[in-house]
Protein backbone atom coordinates (compact mmCIF):
# COMPACT_ATOMS: atom_id res chain seq x y z
CA UNK A 1 0.00 0.00 0.00
CA UNK A 2 1.31 3.49 -0.85
CA UNK A 3 1.73 6.27 1.69
CA UNK A 4 -1.36 7.95 0.26
CA UNK A 5 -3.26 4.71 0.60
CA UNK A 6 -2.19 4.35 4.22
CA UNK A 7 -3.31 7.93 4.96
CA UNK A 8 -6.67 7.35 3.33
CA UNK A 9 -7.15 4.11 5.23
CA UNK A 10 -6.31 5.88 8.51
CA UNK A 11 -8.75 8.67 7.72
CA UNK A 12 -11.49 6.18 6.97
CA UNK A 13 -10.79 4.30 10.20
CA UNK A 14 -10.92 7.58 12.12
CA UNK A 15 -14.29 8.44 10.61
CA UNK A 16 -15.70 5.05 11.45
CA UNK A 17 -14.32 5.29 14.98
CA UNK A 18 -15.88 8.70 15.48
CA UNK A 19 -19.19 7.37 14.17
CA UNK A 20 -19.06 4.52 16.65
CA UNK A 21 -18.32 6.87 19.54
CA UNK A 22 -21.19 9.11 18.52
CA UNK A 23 -23.53 6.16 18.28
CA UNK A 24 -22.69 5.25 21.89
CA UNK A 25 -23.18 8.83 22.98
CA UNK A 26 -26.61 9.03 21.41
CA UNK A 27 -27.68 5.83 23.09
CA UNK A 28 -26.53 7.10 26.47
CA UNK A 29 -28.43 10.38 25.99
CA UNK A 30 -31.69 8.52 25.91
CA UNK A 31 -31.35 7.53 29.53
CA UNK A 32 -30.19 10.73 31.13
CA UNK A 33 -31.03 14.38 30.91
CA UNK A 34 -28.43 16.17 28.82
CA UNK A 35 -27.15 19.35 30.36
CA UNK A 36 -25.38 22.27 28.69
CA UNK A 37 -22.13 20.95 27.26
CA UNK A 38 -18.72 22.41 27.87
CA UNK A 39 -16.87 20.01 25.58
CA UNK A 40 -16.74 19.48 21.81
CA UNK A 41 -19.80 17.72 20.46
CA UNK A 42 -19.75 15.49 17.43
CA UNK A 43 -22.46 14.49 15.01
CA UNK A 44 -21.60 11.65 12.64
CA UNK A 45 -23.61 10.03 9.89
CA UNK A 46 -23.00 7.85 6.88
CA UNK A 47 -24.94 7.97 3.62
CA UNK A 48 -24.78 4.96 1.36
CA UNK A 49 -26.38 3.47 -1.72
CA UNK A 50 -26.58 0.25 -3.72
CA UNK A 51 -27.52 0.57 -7.39
CA UNK A 52 -28.70 -1.53 -10.30
CA UNK A 53 -28.59 -0.08 -13.78
CA UNK A 54 -29.60 -1.34 -17.21
CA UNK A 55 -29.16 0.56 -20.46
CA UNK A 56 -30.21 -0.08 -24.03
CA UNK A 57 -26.65 0.14 -25.24
CA UNK A 58 -25.16 -3.27 -25.94
CA UNK A 59 -21.71 -2.33 -24.57
CA UNK A 60 -23.07 -1.82 -21.05
CA UNK A 61 -24.67 -4.93 -19.54
CA UNK A 62 -27.09 -4.50 -16.67
CA UNK A 63 -25.20 -4.49 -13.43
CA UNK A 64 -25.31 -4.03 -9.69
CA UNK A 65 -22.80 -1.66 -8.16
CA UNK A 66 -22.07 0.16 -4.94
CA UNK A 67 -22.68 3.86 -4.83
CA UNK A 68 -20.76 6.37 -2.79
CA UNK A 69 -20.49 5.94 0.96
CA UNK A 70 -20.34 9.48 2.36
CA UNK A 71 -18.98 9.63 5.90
CA UNK A 72 -20.06 12.89 7.43
CA UNK A 73 -18.79 14.40 10.67
CA UNK A 74 -19.66 17.75 12.18
CA UNK A 75 -17.87 18.68 15.40
CA UNK A 76 -18.76 21.73 17.41
CA UNK A 77 -15.59 22.94 19.10
CA UNK A 78 -17.46 25.67 20.94
CA UNK A 79 -20.54 27.84 20.48
CA UNK A 80 -19.06 29.58 17.46
CA UNK A 81 -16.44 27.30 15.94
CA UNK A 82 -17.12 24.00 14.24
CA UNK A 83 -15.45 21.57 11.87
CA UNK A 84 -17.24 19.71 9.09
CA UNK A 85 -15.77 16.85 7.10
CA UNK A 86 -17.23 14.69 4.36
CA UNK A 87 -15.18 11.72 3.27
CA UNK A 88 -16.51 9.74 0.33
CA UNK A 89 -15.51 6.11 -0.06
CA UNK A 90 -16.13 4.43 -3.40
CA UNK A 91 -15.81 0.69 -3.67
CA UNK A 92 -15.50 -1.60 -6.66
CA UNK A 93 -18.35 -4.08 -7.14
CA UNK A 94 -15.83 -6.75 -8.11
CA UNK A 95 -13.23 -6.38 -5.36
CA UNK A 96 -12.94 -4.95 -1.89
CA UNK A 97 -10.67 -2.15 -3.04
CA UNK A 98 -11.82 1.34 -2.13
CA UNK A 99 -10.83 4.84 -3.05
CA UNK A 100 -11.39 7.64 -0.58
CA UNK A 101 -11.86 11.32 -1.42
CA UNK A 102 -12.04 14.14 1.05
CA UNK A 103 -14.92 16.06 -0.49
CA UNK A 104 -15.40 18.67 2.20
CA UNK A 105 -13.30 19.88 5.10
CA UNK A 106 -14.34 23.18 6.57
CA UNK A 107 -13.54 25.08 9.72
CA UNK A 108 -16.41 27.50 10.33
CA UNK A 109 -16.65 30.50 12.57
CA UNK A 110 -20.25 31.60 13.21
CA UNK A 111 -20.24 35.14 14.46
CA UNK A 112 -24.05 35.34 14.22
CA UNK A 113 -26.79 34.59 11.70
CA UNK A 114 -25.44 37.31 9.43
CA UNK A 115 -21.82 36.21 9.20
CA UNK A 116 -20.47 32.65 8.94
CA UNK A 117 -16.92 32.30 7.71
CA UNK A 118 -15.53 28.97 6.52
CA UNK A 119 -12.08 27.96 5.38
CA UNK A 120 -11.19 24.74 3.64
CA UNK A 121 -12.60 22.57 0.89
CA UNK A 122 -16.24 23.27 0.10
CA UNK A 123 -18.94 22.73 -2.48
CA UNK A 124 -19.29 25.90 -4.51
CA UNK A 125 -22.49 27.87 -4.10
CA UNK A 126 -23.17 27.91 -7.84
CA UNK A 127 -26.92 27.66 -8.23
CA UNK A 128 -28.90 25.59 -5.71
CA UNK A 129 -28.30 21.88 -6.22
CA UNK A 130 -24.58 21.70 -5.57
CA UNK A 131 -24.52 23.20 -2.09
CA UNK A 132 -27.82 21.61 -1.11
CA UNK A 133 -27.33 17.90 -1.73
CA UNK A 134 -23.55 17.41 -1.67
CA UNK A 135 -22.82 13.65 -1.73
CA UNK A 136 -25.93 12.60 0.15
CA UNK A 137 -27.89 10.57 -2.37
CA UNK A 138 -30.47 9.89 0.34
CA UNK A 139 -31.66 13.50 0.17
CA UNK A 140 -31.93 13.53 -3.63
CA UNK A 141 -35.36 12.59 -4.90
CA UNK A 142 -34.14 11.11 -8.19
CA UNK A 143 -31.18 8.83 -8.85
CA UNK A 144 -28.12 10.87 -9.71
CA UNK A 145 -27.43 14.55 -10.05
CA UNK A 146 -28.54 16.63 -13.00
CA UNK A 147 -25.98 16.47 -15.84
CA UNK A 148 -24.80 20.06 -15.28
CA UNK A 149 -24.05 19.32 -11.60
CA UNK A 150 -22.23 16.06 -12.16
CA UNK A 151 -18.99 15.80 -10.16
CA UNK A 152 -15.71 16.78 -11.84
CA UNK A 153 -14.37 13.21 -11.91
CA UNK A 154 -17.61 12.03 -13.55
CA UNK A 155 -17.39 14.49 -16.44
CA UNK A 156 -19.14 17.46 -14.89
CA UNK A 157 -18.46 20.88 -16.44
CA UNK A 158 -18.67 22.96 -13.25
CA UNK A 159 -16.15 23.68 -10.50
CA UNK A 160 -18.08 21.61 -7.96
CA UNK A 161 -15.39 21.60 -5.27
CA UNK A 162 -12.93 24.33 -4.37
CA UNK A 163 -10.42 25.14 -1.69
CA UNK A 164 -10.59 28.61 -0.22
CA UNK A 165 -12.78 30.84 1.89
CA UNK A 166 -16.54 30.96 2.02
CA UNK A 167 -18.74 33.54 3.73
CA UNK A 168 -22.50 33.18 4.05
CA UNK A 169 -25.41 34.40 6.11
CA UNK A 170 -28.61 36.38 6.19
CA UNK A 171 -28.75 39.94 4.91
CA UNK A 172 -29.61 42.20 7.87
CA UNK A 173 -32.94 44.03 7.95
CA UNK A 174 -34.59 41.70 5.45
CA UNK A 175 -36.61 39.76 8.03
CA UNK A 176 -34.36 36.73 7.45
CA UNK A 177 -35.64 36.45 3.88
CA UNK A 178 -32.53 37.41 1.93
CA UNK A 179 -29.38 35.28 2.13
CA UNK A 180 -25.96 35.78 0.61
CA UNK A 181 -22.89 33.70 -0.16
CA UNK A 182 -19.45 34.88 -1.22
CA UNK A 183 -16.56 32.53 -2.02
CA UNK A 184 -12.91 32.94 -2.95
CA UNK A 185 -10.99 29.87 -4.04
CA UNK A 186 -8.26 28.47 -6.21
CA UNK A 187 -10.65 27.62 -9.03
CA UNK A 188 -11.01 24.37 -10.89
CA UNK A 189 -7.77 22.80 -12.04
CA UNK A 190 -8.23 21.94 -15.72
CA UNK A 191 -4.64 20.98 -16.55
CA UNK A 192 -2.46 18.64 -14.52
CA UNK A 193 -5.43 17.79 -12.30
CA UNK A 194 -3.59 14.84 -10.76
CA UNK A 195 -0.95 17.14 -9.31
CA UNK A 196 -0.39 15.93 -5.74
CA UNK A 197 -0.39 19.29 -3.96
CA UNK A 198 -3.04 20.80 -6.18
CA UNK A 199 -1.87 24.37 -5.61
CA UNK A 200 -3.36 27.16 -7.70
CA UNK A 201 -1.74 27.56 -11.09
CA UNK A 202 -1.96 31.34 -11.23
CA UNK A 203 -2.44 34.34 -8.99
CA UNK A 204 -6.02 34.89 -10.04
CA UNK A 205 -8.53 33.50 -7.59
CA UNK A 206 -11.97 32.29 -8.49
CA UNK A 207 -14.84 34.21 -6.95
CA UNK A 208 -18.48 33.39 -6.59
CA UNK A 209 -21.28 35.52 -5.20
CA UNK A 210 -24.90 34.57 -4.77
CA UNK A 211 -28.14 35.90 -3.36
CA UNK A 212 -31.26 33.96 -2.49
CA UNK A 213 -34.69 35.02 -1.32
CA UNK A 214 -36.78 32.81 0.98
CA UNK A 215 -39.99 34.68 1.74
CA UNK A 216 -41.55 33.76 5.07
CA UNK A 217 -45.00 34.16 3.61
CA UNK A 218 -44.30 31.33 1.15
CA UNK A 219 -42.45 28.72 3.19
CA UNK A 220 -40.37 26.29 1.18
CA UNK A 221 -39.93 28.66 -1.73
CA UNK A 222 -36.54 30.02 -2.70
CA UNK A 223 -35.35 31.97 -5.71
CA UNK A 224 -31.75 32.88 -6.24
CA UNK A 225 -28.91 33.74 -8.57
CA UNK A 226 -25.15 33.42 -8.49
CA UNK A 227 -22.22 34.59 -10.55
CA UNK A 228 -18.85 32.85 -10.69
CA UNK A 229 -15.68 34.02 -12.41
CA UNK A 230 -12.16 32.71 -12.81
CA UNK A 231 -9.07 33.07 -14.98
CA UNK A 232 -7.85 29.65 -16.05
CA UNK A 233 -4.19 29.36 -17.17
CA UNK A 234 -3.51 27.41 -20.38
CA UNK A 235 0.22 26.66 -20.48
CA UNK A 236 2.03 29.42 -22.35
CA UNK A 237 -1.13 30.63 -24.10
CA UNK A 238 -3.27 33.51 -22.84
CA UNK A 239 -5.52 32.48 -19.98
CA UNK A 240 -9.20 31.75 -20.41
CA UNK A 241 -11.77 33.94 -18.72
CA UNK A 242 -14.48 31.74 -17.30
CA UNK A 243 -17.88 33.02 -16.11
CA UNK A 244 -20.85 31.05 -14.80
CA UNK A 245 -24.22 32.70 -14.27
CA UNK A 246 -26.93 30.68 -12.54
CA UNK A 247 -30.56 31.36 -11.70
CA UNK A 248 -32.97 29.07 -9.91
CA UNK A 249 -36.40 28.74 -8.39
CA UNK A 250 -37.16 26.05 -5.83
CA UNK A 251 -40.19 25.02 -3.81
CA UNK A 252 -39.48 22.19 -1.39
CA UNK A 253 -41.92 21.02 1.26
CA UNK A 254 -42.29 17.50 2.65
CA UNK A 255 -45.11 16.71 0.23
CA UNK A 256 -44.29 18.81 -2.81
CA UNK A 257 -41.05 19.54 -4.60
CA UNK A 258 -40.37 21.72 -7.61
CA UNK A 259 -36.88 22.72 -8.67
CA UNK A 260 -35.70 24.53 -11.77
CA UNK A 261 -32.21 25.85 -12.52
CA UNK A 262 -30.51 27.28 -15.54
CA UNK A 263 -26.81 28.04 -15.92
CA UNK A 264 -24.76 29.76 -18.58
CA UNK A 265 -21.08 28.85 -18.81
CA UNK A 266 -19.00 31.38 -20.78
CA UNK A 267 -15.39 31.02 -21.86
CA UNK A 268 -13.17 33.54 -23.64
CA UNK A 269 -9.45 33.57 -24.39
CA UNK A 270 -7.97 36.71 -22.87
CA UNK A 271 -6.64 37.91 -26.25
CA UNK A 272 -9.85 37.16 -28.16
CA UNK A 273 -13.31 38.62 -28.44
CA UNK A 274 -14.90 35.26 -29.23
CA UNK A 275 -17.20 33.99 -26.49
CA UNK A 276 -18.10 30.35 -26.16
CA UNK A 277 -21.44 30.13 -24.41
CA UNK A 278 -22.82 26.87 -23.07
CA UNK A 279 -26.03 26.18 -21.21
CA UNK A 280 -27.37 23.58 -18.87
CA UNK A 281 -30.15 23.08 -16.41
CA UNK A 282 -33.02 20.96 -15.28
CA UNK A 283 -36.61 21.04 -14.11
CA UNK A 284 -37.71 18.52 -11.51
CA UNK A 285 -41.05 17.97 -9.83
CA UNK A 286 -42.32 15.40 -7.37
CA UNK A 287 -45.29 14.85 -5.11
CA UNK A 288 -45.46 12.52 -2.12
CA UNK A 289 -48.50 10.31 -1.55
CA UNK A 290 -47.70 8.80 1.82
CA UNK A 291 -44.52 6.76 1.42
CA UNK A 292 -44.62 6.87 -2.38
CA UNK A 293 -43.29 9.80 -4.35
CA UNK A 294 -43.50 9.87 -8.16
CA UNK A 295 -41.13 12.30 -9.86
CA UNK A 296 -40.07 13.67 -13.21
CA UNK A 297 -36.89 15.43 -14.30
CA UNK A 298 -36.03 17.18 -17.54
CA UNK A 299 -32.26 17.42 -17.74
CA UNK A 300 -30.39 19.30 -20.45
CA UNK A 301 -26.82 20.28 -21.29
CA UNK A 302 -25.86 22.22 -24.44
CA UNK A 303 -22.14 22.31 -25.06
CA UNK A 304 -20.46 24.22 -27.88
CA UNK A 305 -17.83 21.75 -29.20
CA UNK A 306 -15.31 24.60 -29.73
CA UNK A 307 -15.35 25.60 -26.07
CA UNK A 308 -12.03 25.27 -24.23
CA UNK A 309 -11.83 22.51 -21.60
CA UNK A 310 -15.43 21.25 -21.92
CA UNK A 311 -15.90 21.15 -25.71
CA UNK A 312 -15.77 17.35 -25.80
CA UNK A 313 -18.17 16.84 -22.87
CA UNK A 314 -21.06 16.49 -25.30
CA UNK A 315 -24.63 17.75 -25.26
CA UNK A 316 -27.52 15.77 -23.90
CA UNK A 317 -31.21 15.80 -23.14
CA UNK A 318 -32.60 13.36 -20.62
CA UNK A 319 -36.12 12.66 -19.46
CA UNK A 320 -36.40 10.84 -16.17
CA UNK A 321 -39.63 9.38 -14.79
CA UNK A 322 -39.48 7.52 -11.52
CA UNK A 323 -40.96 6.56 -8.20
CA UNK A 324 -39.35 6.81 -4.81
CA UNK A 325 -40.54 4.67 -1.93
CA UNK A 326 -39.55 5.35 1.69
CA UNK A 327 -40.68 2.14 3.45
CA UNK A 328 -39.04 2.94 6.79
CA UNK A 329 -37.30 6.02 8.17
CA UNK A 330 -33.85 6.64 6.70
CA UNK A 331 -34.21 4.07 3.92
CA UNK A 332 -35.43 4.84 0.41
CA UNK A 333 -35.78 2.95 -2.87
CA UNK A 334 -35.78 4.84 -6.15
CA UNK A 335 -36.70 3.31 -9.50
CA UNK A 336 -36.55 5.37 -12.63
CA UNK A 337 -36.86 5.09 -16.37
CA UNK A 338 -34.50 7.29 -18.40
CA UNK A 339 -34.65 8.39 -22.00
CA UNK A 340 -31.33 9.89 -23.06
CA UNK A 341 -30.48 11.78 -26.26
CA UNK A 342 -26.77 12.49 -26.68
CA UNK A 343 -25.24 14.85 -29.26
CA UNK A 344 -28.39 14.89 -31.36
CA UNK A 345 -28.38 11.12 -31.77
CA UNK A 346 -31.29 8.72 -31.32
CA UNK A 347 -32.74 8.22 -27.89
CA UNK A 348 -31.55 5.42 -25.63
CA UNK A 349 -33.58 3.86 -22.87
CA UNK A 350 -32.31 3.01 -19.43
CA UNK A 351 -33.49 1.87 -16.04
CA UNK A 352 -31.84 2.73 -12.75
CA UNK A 353 -32.77 1.42 -9.33
CA UNK A 354 -31.11 2.76 -6.22
CA UNK A 355 -31.36 1.79 -2.57
CA UNK A 356 -30.32 4.69 -0.33
CA UNK A 357 -29.86 4.78 3.43
CA UNK A 358 -28.55 6.83 6.33
CA UNK A 359 -27.14 5.56 9.57
CA UNK B 1 -105.13 16.35 17.80
CA UNK B 2 -104.81 19.38 20.04
CA UNK B 3 -103.75 17.50 23.21
CA UNK B 4 -101.18 15.50 21.20
CA UNK B 5 -99.67 18.67 19.72
CA UNK B 6 -99.51 20.26 23.13
CA UNK B 7 -97.81 17.19 24.58
CA UNK B 8 -95.26 17.18 21.78
CA UNK B 9 -94.54 20.87 22.31
CA UNK B 10 -94.07 20.31 26.02
CA UNK B 11 -91.76 17.38 25.38
CA UNK B 12 -89.62 19.41 22.97
CA UNK B 13 -89.39 22.28 25.44
CA UNK B 14 -88.41 19.91 28.21
CA UNK B 15 -85.73 18.29 26.00
CA UNK B 16 -84.31 21.66 25.04
CA UNK B 17 -84.11 22.74 28.67
CA UNK B 18 -82.44 19.48 29.61
CA UNK B 19 -79.83 19.82 26.87
CA UNK B 20 -79.15 23.42 27.86
CA UNK B 21 -78.62 22.33 31.43
CA UNK B 22 -76.29 19.46 30.52
CA UNK B 23 -74.22 21.22 27.79
CA UNK B 24 -71.66 22.90 30.07
CA UNK B 25 -70.95 19.52 31.65
CA UNK B 26 -70.49 17.90 28.23
CA UNK B 27 -68.08 20.59 27.00
CA UNK B 28 -64.43 19.52 27.32
CA UNK B 29 -62.28 22.44 28.36
CA UNK B 30 -59.50 23.44 25.94
CA UNK B 31 -56.15 22.03 27.00
CA UNK B 32 -53.64 24.59 28.20
CA UNK B 33 -51.50 25.96 25.34
CA UNK B 34 -47.79 25.47 24.79
CA UNK B 35 -45.61 27.99 26.57
CA UNK B 36 -42.16 28.87 25.23
CA UNK B 37 -39.52 29.34 27.91
CA UNK B 38 -36.04 30.83 27.97
CA UNK B 39 -33.37 31.54 30.56
CA UNK B 40 -34.24 34.32 32.98
CA UNK B 41 -31.25 36.39 31.88
CA UNK B 42 -32.37 36.37 28.25
CA UNK B 43 -33.29 39.98 27.36
CA UNK B 44 -35.74 38.85 24.67
CA UNK B 45 -39.33 39.34 25.85
CA UNK B 46 -41.29 38.47 22.72
CA UNK B 47 -40.81 36.88 19.30
CA UNK B 48 -43.14 36.61 16.37
CA UNK B 49 -44.58 33.23 15.46
CA UNK B 50 -42.45 33.30 12.27
CA UNK B 51 -39.30 33.95 14.29
CA UNK B 52 -40.18 31.13 16.66
CA UNK B 53 -40.61 28.75 13.73
CA UNK B 54 -37.23 29.80 12.33
CA UNK B 55 -35.63 29.24 15.75
CA UNK B 56 -37.05 25.73 16.08
CA UNK B 57 -36.12 24.95 12.45
CA UNK B 58 -32.57 26.12 13.33
CA UNK B 59 -32.71 28.73 10.58
CA UNK B 60 -32.08 31.37 13.25
CA UNK B 61 -29.28 30.27 15.55
CA UNK B 62 -28.36 33.35 17.56
CA UNK B 63 -30.39 35.61 19.80
CA UNK B 64 -30.40 39.32 18.90
CA UNK B 65 -27.90 39.94 21.73
CA UNK B 66 -25.49 37.48 20.10
CA UNK B 67 -25.78 34.38 22.27
CA UNK B 68 -26.08 31.02 20.55
CA UNK B 69 -29.57 29.53 20.67
CA UNK B 70 -29.94 25.99 22.01
CA UNK B 71 -33.28 24.48 21.04
CA UNK B 72 -34.63 21.95 23.52
CA UNK B 73 -37.33 19.43 22.66
CA UNK B 74 -38.87 16.52 24.50
CA UNK B 75 -37.42 13.12 23.62
CA UNK B 76 -38.24 11.27 20.43
CA UNK B 77 -41.44 9.31 20.66
CA UNK B 78 -42.98 11.47 23.39
CA UNK B 79 -46.31 12.98 22.31
CA UNK B 80 -45.26 16.39 23.66
CA UNK B 81 -42.45 16.48 21.10
CA UNK B 82 -44.57 15.65 18.08
CA UNK B 83 -47.28 18.06 19.16
CA UNK B 84 -44.87 20.97 19.66
CA UNK B 85 -43.15 20.32 16.31
CA UNK B 86 -46.53 20.21 14.58
CA UNK B 87 -47.78 23.41 16.20
CA UNK B 88 -44.60 25.45 15.92
CA UNK B 89 -43.04 24.14 12.69
CA UNK B 90 -46.08 22.75 10.88
CA UNK B 91 -44.27 19.44 10.26
CA UNK B 92 -44.57 15.85 11.38
CA UNK B 93 -41.83 14.61 13.70
CA UNK B 94 -40.31 12.47 10.93
CA UNK B 95 -40.23 15.36 8.46
CA UNK B 96 -38.68 17.58 11.12
CA UNK B 97 -35.91 15.05 11.83
CA UNK B 98 -35.21 14.75 8.12
CA UNK B 99 -35.11 18.51 7.68
CA UNK B 100 -32.71 18.99 10.59
CA UNK B 101 -30.39 16.27 9.27
CA UNK B 102 -30.56 17.85 5.80
CA UNK B 103 -29.54 21.23 7.20
CA UNK B 104 -26.80 19.64 9.31
CA UNK B 105 -25.47 17.87 6.22
CA UNK B 106 -25.45 21.19 4.38
CA UNK B 107 -23.23 22.58 7.11
CA UNK B 108 -25.83 25.13 8.19
CA UNK B 109 -26.38 23.58 11.63
CA UNK B 110 -23.73 22.61 14.15
CA UNK B 111 -25.71 20.62 16.63
CA UNK B 112 -29.36 19.72 16.39
CA UNK B 113 -31.96 20.27 19.11
CA UNK B 114 -31.34 18.77 22.54
CA UNK B 115 -33.72 16.07 23.75
CA UNK B 116 -35.11 16.15 27.27
CA UNK B 117 -36.97 13.38 29.08
CA UNK B 118 -39.49 15.28 31.18
CA UNK B 119 -41.04 18.67 31.85
CA UNK B 120 -39.06 19.10 35.05
CA UNK B 121 -35.83 18.25 33.22
CA UNK B 122 -36.77 20.82 30.56
CA UNK B 123 -37.08 23.49 33.25
CA UNK B 124 -33.75 22.46 34.79
CA UNK B 125 -32.00 22.59 31.44
CA UNK B 126 -33.37 26.00 30.45
CA UNK B 127 -32.61 27.29 33.95
CA UNK B 128 -28.96 26.32 33.56
CA UNK B 129 -28.39 27.21 29.86
CA UNK B 130 -28.49 30.97 29.12
CA UNK B 131 -29.09 30.47 25.38
CA UNK B 132 -31.70 27.73 25.66
CA UNK B 133 -35.25 27.88 24.39
CA UNK B 134 -37.71 25.15 25.28
CA UNK B 135 -41.39 24.65 25.84
CA UNK B 136 -43.84 23.36 28.40
CA UNK B 137 -47.56 22.97 28.77
CA UNK B 138 -48.52 26.41 30.06
CA UNK B 139 -49.61 25.25 33.52
CA UNK B 140 -46.19 23.62 34.10
CA UNK B 141 -44.19 26.85 33.88
CA UNK B 142 -42.47 27.88 37.10
CA UNK B 143 -40.65 31.10 38.05
CA UNK B 144 -37.16 29.65 37.57
CA UNK B 145 -37.50 30.27 33.81
CA UNK B 146 -38.83 33.13 31.72
CA UNK B 147 -42.00 32.90 29.68
CA UNK B 148 -41.62 34.23 26.15
CA UNK B 149 -44.46 36.15 24.53
CA UNK B 150 -45.40 35.04 21.03
CA UNK B 151 -46.67 37.82 18.78
CA UNK B 152 -46.73 39.88 22.00
CA UNK B 153 -49.30 37.52 23.52
CA UNK B 154 -49.14 35.40 26.65
CA UNK B 155 -50.61 31.88 26.80
CA UNK B 156 -53.59 33.19 28.75
CA UNK B 157 -54.67 35.30 25.78
CA UNK B 158 -57.30 33.64 23.57
CA UNK B 159 -55.41 34.88 20.49
CA UNK B 160 -52.18 33.17 21.57
CA UNK B 161 -50.95 31.18 18.54
CA UNK B 162 -49.60 28.04 20.25
CA UNK B 163 -52.97 26.68 21.31
CA UNK B 164 -53.50 22.96 21.48
CA UNK B 165 -56.72 21.51 20.22
CA UNK B 166 -58.84 19.07 22.18
CA UNK B 167 -57.74 16.20 20.00
CA UNK B 168 -54.12 17.27 20.01
CA UNK B 169 -54.38 18.66 16.50
CA UNK B 170 -53.50 22.34 16.24
CA UNK B 171 -56.50 24.46 15.37
CA UNK B 172 -54.63 26.01 12.44
CA UNK B 173 -54.40 22.61 10.73
CA UNK B 174 -58.08 21.74 11.05
Image: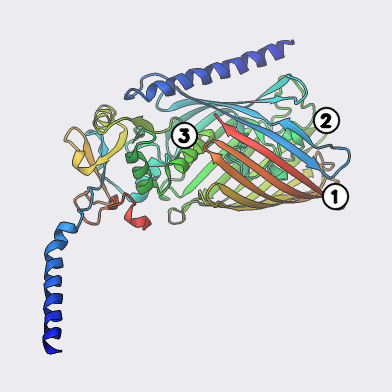
**Front one among B100 and A290:** A290
For mark 1, what is the residue?
Answer: A343
Q: Position of residue A215 (x, y in %)?
A: 46, 54
Alpha carbons under labels 2 and 3: distance apart: 42 Å
For mark 2, what is the residue?
Answer: A235
Q: Quadrant of residue A189?
A: top right
The answer for which chain carries disc 1 is A
Is A116 left or right of B124, judged from the image as shown?
right
For mark 3, what is the residue?
Answer: B109
Q: In which quadrant is the N terminus of chain A drawn?
A: top right
Residue shown at 69% from the left, 31% from the top: A67
Q: How was this image coloured?
A: rainbow
Looking at the image, residue A148 lies above or below residue A165: below
Q: Nearer the viewer, mark 2 or mark 3?
A: 3
Q: Quadrant of residue A148?
A: top right
Is A259 left or right of A53, judged from the image as shown?
left
Looking at the image, residue A9 lies above or below residue A110: above
Circle 3 packing at 10 Å, graded few (<14), some (14-19), many (20+), is: many
Spot the residue most to the bottom.
B1
Q: Position of residue A79 (x, y in %)?
A: 40, 27
Q: Position of residue A153 (x, y in %)?
A: 75, 32
Amino acid sequence: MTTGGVCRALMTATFIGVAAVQSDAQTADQHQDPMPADRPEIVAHAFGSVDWVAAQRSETPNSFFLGQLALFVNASINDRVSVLAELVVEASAATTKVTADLERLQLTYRMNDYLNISAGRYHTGIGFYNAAFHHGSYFETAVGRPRIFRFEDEGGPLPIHEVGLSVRGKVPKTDSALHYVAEVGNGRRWADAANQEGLDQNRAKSTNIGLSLRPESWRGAEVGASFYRDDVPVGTEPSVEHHIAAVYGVYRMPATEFMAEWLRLSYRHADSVTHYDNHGGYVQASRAFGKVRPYYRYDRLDINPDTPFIGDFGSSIKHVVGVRLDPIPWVGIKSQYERLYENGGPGANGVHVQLVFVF
Amino acid sequence: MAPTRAALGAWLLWTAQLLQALLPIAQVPSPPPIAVIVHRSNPVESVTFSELRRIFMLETQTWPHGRKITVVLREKGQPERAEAIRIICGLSEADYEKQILFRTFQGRVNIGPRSIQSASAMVRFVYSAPGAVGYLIADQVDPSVKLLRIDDLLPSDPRYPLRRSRRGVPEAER
